[in-house]
Image (cartoon, grey):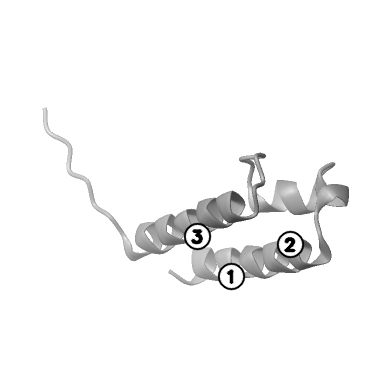
Amino acid sequence: MTYSTRITKNDLCLNFLSDVYTNWLDDQKIDHKICASELLYGRIRSQLTNSQKQWLGTFIEIWELTDENT
């Protein structure tokens, strides 16, 4: 049996954003590998700088717009 893998524009965009997020986590030395919204709104929020919170908020907006429009 063979499987056909079809990569959509949405997949490519979200994979790119996932890479951006993972790199940002590494650059920020954030060890919590959880989704951006859990990081921003969860119990770790108090440990984030204002700049990190702003970046996460913007990233979440971009992710949602990309997911809705591709």
- Distance of mark 3 from mark 1, alpha carbons? 12 Å
Q: Which amino acid does label 1 sit on?
A: Ile
Element class at badge 3: helix
- Distance of mark 2 from mark 3, alpha carbons? 14 Å
54 lies above or below 36: below
Outermost residue to the right: 46
Residue identified by numbered label 3: 20
Relative to 39, 46 lies left or right: right
Residue at the location (60% across, 51% down)?
Answer: 25
Classify 10 Å Cα crowding around label 2: few (below 14), some (14-19), many (20 and above).
some
Residue identified by numbered label 1: 62
> Percent from the top left, x then y, of residue 9?
34, 65
Residue identified by numbered label 2: 52
Sequence-wise, the earlier of marks 3 and 1 is: 3
Q: In which quarter of the image is the C terminus?
A: bottom left
Classify 10 Å Cα crowding around label 1: few (below 14), some (14-19), many (20 and above).
few
Residue at the location (81% across, 44% down)?
Answer: 44
